[in-house]
Amino acid sequence: MKIITPFLITLLFIFSNSSAEWIQQTSGTTETLLGVSFPSLQTGYVCGTSGLILKTQNQGTNWTQLSTGVTGFIRDIVFANNNTGWAAGESGLLITTTNGGVNWSTQSSGTTQHLVHIHFIDQLNGFASGQNGVIIHTTNAGSTWTSQTSGVSVEIPCITMITTDVIGAAGFGGAIIGTTNMGTNWQPQSSGTSQDLRGIYYTSTTDGYACGYGGTILKTTNGTTWNTQTSGTTNNLFALYFYTQNTGTVVGTNKILRTTDGGSSWINQPYASAGDLYDVTFVNLSTGWAVGQNGRIYFTNNGGVGIRMISSEIPKTFSLQQNYPNPFNPKTVIRYELPSAASGNIVSLKIFDIIGNEIAVLLNEKQISGIYEAEFDAKDLPSGVYFYRLTAGNFSSTRKMTLIK
């Protein structure tokens, strides 16, 4: 029987200069940051209060403030490529750039409602949503925006395009709506909650996730029926991003959560400071950013998971080595080796207690061949015997470790 432990299990990635999984970057501002978009591995943009837009061209090592000509809130930002992007905000604000933010021009949104979210699926097709049920749509890169009838009057803080025709949106009071004809008709869906929803993300036309206040996380596998997942928190959750169908990250008030099994379990990931995080994005399974209050930008290059490749040398065989130190208190390192035969297979590394209850999922996704180390922190677990199991394709190996406090 699978048990989601109430204990907080933190999985810490060892950097040469830090033990945090999410590293705070220097943004150069104390403005509240509300949106983040990375069109490529190196180039990214962040937006926030007081008309703020920041840009990086080196993964956030350095951030530069851009001149937008805006003084109000910029609530969200999206880039279709390194140069072409849009931002949305207060009183129907829409601005766009085609030269990487050097120049910004205003677009006519046709509304004075605050726009809270914007999403483009390519350089031409986009949607924006906001207060009082407003939804607007463009098919020509924003040269013209057309208002649509959403059928709801609540704020819609999140909208996402799965295809040019299939779009989903979520809002306050548990509202979820969807369309399969580019917004000509929006249909209400049963969310099963009255909590305000703040984020929605689809991994396919039928599979999606939503998050909101009170630790709410919802999932659909048919595009219409939503079921509640166990997030393990009552903190408000504001945004989520899934890079694959099963691997995603949710951020909120003092929380970063990650799943690698489609939301069956959510693992808490520590970060250095307290406060709200309002948006998150990833460019691959391991490289992502989260932004929030007081100008905070957090970066991870290991997905926030405490696993690192220590050698790209391709081993000849699978190997799961004895953890060290053993016995341990409270941290220990698990080393394993993946040969070329591991390619294409899901690799899982899980922790179990002495009676076989699953305690933690350190990894459950594809990895390339190489030699890896995972650091396991059991500071909130009682002393005792535990087991760790590595599985990849037809390979499976289990070893015993002892926690002594």
Image: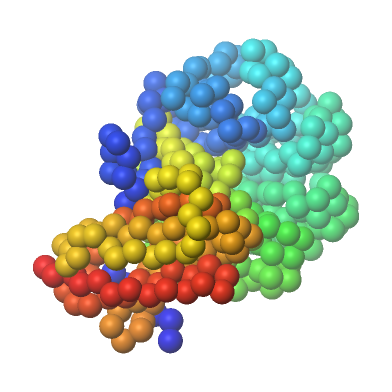
Q: Is residue 56 above or below residue 254?
A: above
- Residue drawn at x 45%, y 21% is 62
Display colour scheme: rainbow
Residue 201 left/right relative to 279: right
Quarter of the image containing the N terminus?
bottom left
Against 15, is 252 above or below?
A: below
Residue nearer the viewer, 135 or 180: 180
Residue 187 makes an appearance in the image: yes
> Where is the C terminus found, in terms of image quarters?
bottom left
Residue 41: x and y in percent read 58, 33
**Viewer-side residue, 158 vs 280:** 280
Residue plotted at (35% across, 84% down):
356
In front: 53, or 322?
A: 322
Residue in the image at 53% along x and 53% along y: 369
Res 117 → quadrant = top right
Residue, far left: 405
Instruction: Locate residue 20: give its quadrant.
Output: top left
Q: Is residue 138 above or below residue 85?
A: below
**Residue at 37% across / 53% down in the picture?**
373
How many numbered marks have been drawn onto this rendered protein structure? 0
Q: Taking 161 as reference, is 89 left or right?
A: left
Q: Where is residue 307 in the image (x, y as percent from the top left)?
A: 40, 52
Residue furthest to the front in view is 316
Residue 49 visible somewhere in the drawing: no
Residue 54 in the image: state x and y as whole percent.
52, 23
Residue 376: give x, y in percent of width and height: 30, 60
